[in-house]
Image (cartoon, grey):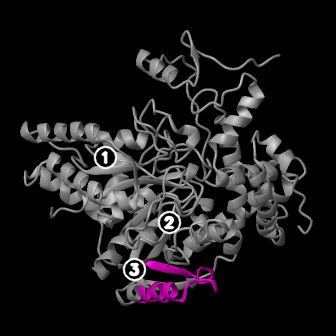
Amino acid sequence: MEYTTAVQIRNAIENKKVTAIEVLEHYLDIIAQKDKEIGAFLEVFEDDARAQAKKIDEMVASGESLPRMAGVPIAVKDNILVKGHIASAGSKILENHVATYDATAVANLKEAGAVIIGRTNMDEFAMGSSTETSFWQVTKNPVDTTKVPGGSSGGSVAAVAAGMVPVALGSSTGGSIQQPASLCGVYGMKPTYGFVSRYGLIALGSSLDQIGAITNDAKDMALVLEVIEGIDEHDATSVDIPEVVTHELLQDNFEGMTFGVPKEYFVDEMDADVKKLVEEAIEKIKSAGGTIKEVSLPLTEYALPAYYIIQPAEASSNLGRFDGMRYGTRAQSDKLKESYLMSRGGGFGKEVKRRIMIGTYVLSAGYYDAYYKKALQIRQMISKDFERVFEEVDVLVGPTSPVVAWGLGDKFDDPIAMYLADIFTVSVNIAGISSISVPCGLAKGLPVGLQFLAGAGQDGKILRAAAAFEALTK
Amino acid sequence: MPNIEFDIDHVAKLAMLDINDEERAMFAEQLPSILAYVGKLAEVDTEGVDSSAYISDLQDVMRKDEEVRSSNELRASLIKSFPKESGGALEVPAVFE
């Protein structure tokens, strides 16, 4: 099939060059061929997807005007609810948890005619940077199947990177969309906090979590965001952002744009080949008319430690609801406390327990001020730093990840080494701003991502930067 | 923060987590080093800095205190997801002994 992006697919269906069923069957075939090796999907909703695609074809036949994503197959991360289907968040404790409603983002996609094709693998409760903490399976990087795809949205990203689906939904709490997108060579965006409703997203860190998308180009990214964004009465933290570029309005030039290069984003521990590619990309932006300015975000090195206090703290609280009482798996005991302990002890994996323990500790009496309160204060300072820098520049540009995809299992037993993979993306969630990772070449045969960051509500700017960079490198 | 005391069993109790011997040994090694790493924050002077949990300009959102009826379908699907059900109600182990 010659149509590979959501925009192309929808238009081809509208112009009767292809039917929605043909599109769907094409992708189902690719999934059948490739996913045994990649392991991106936890479940493929073949019957439901066929029913949705059939409806689109009926609309075409009756001459109705088609919605914005008519017939576009989309995969959904396993922590985003799709009514009537299991949503396990990659965890054993939710192995039988069937969603009783659609997440708002999913409802919006369905409304726009998108075809929900299945749910994808992820790190358990999105805690991880390699998708290896999933209770269910390991997902491999489609570019090199001996490597991790990154995480935690590794299944969604691998599905797009392998061509098994043109678009996928992911979630980011500390870089879980952008970092795997970088490692697999696709587009991944975390919008401004509140831009997309989190209703129906299984919570990890509520002050950090955001739904976003994975696509093959900038135009598709803008299209998906147009569909899923917006204020929602079911999510009190959702916000209305008026000035976002729509996919038809994306420009392919850097005219009038100033890019800040944070000097702290080029650290010693960085892979030299990654550094070189990112520097070359910045040179290209400069040659194409973008203004480049060195800036400083002095607290960058404290973002990751602050994140690994705030996020476990919020997670330890959010995951309190998984006690085996109202839903999920309950351990058999007629003693209440024993049932709690056994349900949680048996239902959660090691990384989840590790973070619940850290989170419980930093919130406990005697340690709250030294850890949690301190981290919140540093968070405010980091946010102010970004505000200051965004008065001088439109967009920040730097690496998405300090390294390329590493070998399966390589960092699994070293939590701190794993956490360091998120060093350039956690700040985005800490400050509630937006960022997108775009492919900028290969190092050692593996993809490298370039990250554009913009201030809260300025998501249109990074979409435009991504579109312009894409035009430059195609 | 040089001396990191981490009483694994106490924290596990607070967190309502059953942990096995293997996990206890692993956490005893890993958790103090994670805390030492995040303890790096002590280097930053935060005197007088606000400690709100949110960073955006979010306003409180109010809704009317109205009764909203769930559909029978939703009710049925929620009951179906209970780990244990008895006559349309959620069955739990005895809370008081």
The 10 Å Cα crowd at callout 3, few under 14, some 14 to 19, many 20 or more, is many
Task: Name the residue rendered at 46%, 46% in the picture.
Answer: A78
Give SS at disc 2. loop
Tell me the subunit letter for badge 1: A
As drawn, A61 above or below A378: above
What x and y, as percent, mark residue A53?
20, 42
Q: Distance between the residues labelled 3 and 2?
A: 17 Å
Return the residue at label 2: A150
Give SS at disc 1. strand
Q: Decide: marks 2, 1 in contact (CB < 8 A)? A: no
Return the residue at label 3: A440
Task: Name the residue rendered at 51%, 20% in the picture.
Answer: B79
Whether B53 is among the magenta residues is: no
In the picture, measured across the screen, residue B15 lies left or right of residue A273, that is right
Amino acid carrying mark 1 in the image: Ile
As drawn, A311 above or below A129: above
Give SS at disc 3. strand
